Amino acid sequence: MRVPDLRAVRGSLNVRAPRRIPLLQVAKSALAIVAAWLIAGWLVQGPPPIFAAIAALLVVQPSVNQSFTRAVERSVGVILGVVIASLLGLAFGSQPWVALLSAVVALVVAWAARISPGATNQIAISALLVLALGTATPNYALDRVLETLIGAAIGIVVNAVLVPPVLVPPAREKIDTLGRELAAALERLADALETPQTPASLEGLLLEARLLRPVRDAAADALRDGEDSLALNPRSGRHRADLAEMGDLLDRFTPVVTQTVGMTRAVYDGYDTSIAAEPAVRAIAEQLHRAAHDVRLAFSLDAGAGRGPEPAAAEEPALTRPLQIQTPSPAHWVLVGSMLTDLHRVHETLRDDGF
């Protein structure tokens, strides 16, 4: 019988997030709750406006677009929930078991209508609250719907007016990280072709190259978050061009990530200690150094990073023409041919768009 890993269990039970949410979002949530409570209490007479406060709290999200989506989910959930609770309350009265029945019916209705999980939970919660906190009368149900709409609207307004979040700078950071890591991987591969390698260093070389994929994925996720933060955002105008440029960079260099990993795997599989003496291999290494320089140039990074000071001419593309080599020795022709194929694709990418 397999014994559970207690460390994994403790990790899955950790209620603390890796990092805090921005303090600004906490402040906006608090302001939205207070405003929703006061405004809804003034507009809708009756019990304390709990529905409005809850709606405002849930609607304030990391982006205005997410706030709008959550507001729609919340509003649809409350409307369906109070309708179900009202109908059951009128039919069966206010017995405790009716509240449980309303939750079950709400879940079944949401499942049948294929409603999103967030709205499904809201339907059941609203049905329970209506029957638990008040009488299931038409006026009470209508007031709770109005409260929810008021709270959701206030949450959207607060999130949109008070410094709406723009997640373009984090996306730029991730894209720059991808450019630096891709250039560094090309440099490491070039160095491995020029100097003798041990099995351990080859393992490390391949591992570092494979880490390019999660770096690329993190950049793609950051771009999606940036696009989401600009949707319905009044501050989006001056950021869209920058985000589009970053998206073009990611699309353009994603194949280069694959080719760099492929070249590194080819070296790992076909390496022997005599490879550094092969003229064709040394020529490929020089081309890889030039490709690393051009990657930094494409990402607007420091062109000389990692290789020491370079002359002013280094600001121009270094990989100016495809590599022409003589037939390699029979011992290395498979490796050389494989790397030349990928290097040619890298060359084509770096020549795209007039670069």
Image: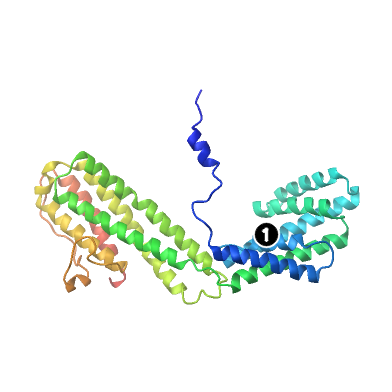
Image quadrant where residue 153 sits: bottom right
Residue appearing at x 30%, y 45% in the figure: 207
Q: Is residue 20 left or right of residue 343?
A: right
The residue furthest bottom is 238
Q: Nearer the viewer, residue 191 or 113?
A: 191
Q: Name the secondary structure under disc 1.
A: helix
Q: Nearer the viewer, residue 162 or 98?
A: 162
Position of the C terminus, as image quadrant, is bottom left
- Please state the total of marks drawn on the protein image: 1
x, y percent for residue 245: 39, 70
Q: Nearer the viewer, residue 141 or 32?
A: 32
The image shows residue 22, relative to residue 14, as above or below, that is: below
Q: Is residue 11 left or right of residue 156?
A: left
x, y percent for residue 156: 64, 68
The three-letter code of the residue at mark 1 reads: Glu
x, y percent for residue 54: 70, 59
Image quadrant where residue 332 sits: top left
Residue appearing at x 45%, y 60% in the figure: 222
Q: Can residue 316 be spotted in the picture?
A: no
Is disc 1 surrounded by few (<14), some (14 to 19) or many (20+) residues within 10 Å? many
The image shows residue 293, relative to residue 118, as above or below, that is: below
Q: Can residue 210 be spotted in the picture?
A: yes
Q: Which residue is mark 1?
A: 73
The residue furthest top is 1
Residue appearing at x 46%, y 73% in the figure: 239
- Colour scheme of this structure image? rainbow
x, y percent for residue 111: 70, 48
